[in-house]
Amino acid sequence: MIDHRPFAKLGHANHGWLNARHHFSFSSYRDPNRMSWGDLRVWNDDEIAAGTGFAPHGHEDMEIITYVRTGAITHQDSLGNTGRTEAGDVQVMSAGSGVRHSENNRETETTTLFQIWIEPKTRGGDPSWGAKPFPKSDRSGQFMALASGFAVDTDALPIRAEARVLGATLKAGQSTIYALAPGRHAYLVLAAGSADLNGLILQTRDGAAVHDEDTLTVTALTDAELVLVDSV
């Protein structure tokens, strides 16, 4: 089963400084059929104007993964962490028992990013934050774990969830296959380009919710950049 979610039909909120599309119910956007996908709770496609950002606010009991598409985002939190995450790179905040943070675009251009929230496997615990560069050349032609709750993914940023966030880049005409274990949910979004997913055509920033499929075969119709969440 694959549920195609075209970019134009996602939830939409334009706050001026923030132009956001919501793959799942979030804030004022409510769709009872799009509350979550397995443990994946939020996938926001955000455009943040230069010199603006999210003021300090709090979270708890959520794994929050930020995938920067263009520009950069600067993070600060109540733990004393600060860092700048650039396009193609990833940051992870495990909110745990509670943390406050801000996310600001200190660049001179609009920053675009995916903000992904995954339910943790246990509640509470000390909050944490980390970021890491992931050169696109390292994930050329195949999916690479960027954030993971599994110890086998030693190069990925750790999260406290039974899930993986993966990225891949494909040249036009190139294919890759991802095996989906029984009972798990996959959610795929094209960060750039167009691709064929098991016979379904996806365009830039479209989403696809996948369940009860043994394998995901993705063929790039143009040069493409893919982000995938695999969760229970």
Image (cartoon, grey):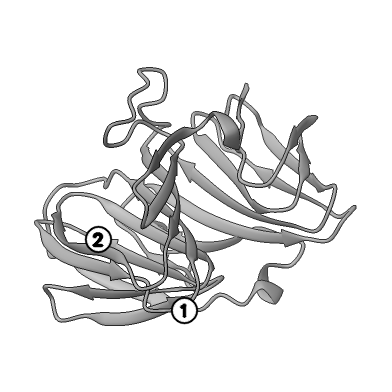
Residue that badge 2 annotates: 94
Location of residue 204 in the rendering, given as x and y in whole percent from the top left corner: 67, 47
Mark 2, other Cα within 10 Å: few <14 / some 14–19 / many ≥20: many
Q: Please give left or right for residue 20 compared with residue 189 in the image.
A: left
Q: Residue 75, located in which quarter of the rendered image?
A: bottom left
**Residue 57: in sight, yes or no?**
yes
**Residue 170 or 215: which is nearer the viewer?**
170
- Residue beneath the point at 34% across and 30% down: 29
Query: Can you tell which mark lies on residue 108?
Result: 1
Kind of residue at badge 2? Ser
Q: Quadrant of residue 223?
A: bottom right
Q: What's the amino acid at mark 1?
A: Thr
| Residue appearing at x 29%, y 43% in the figure | 119
Q: Give the x, y percent position of residue 43.
A: 43, 44
> Would residue 208 be visible to someone looking at this image?
no
Secondary element at tag 2: strand
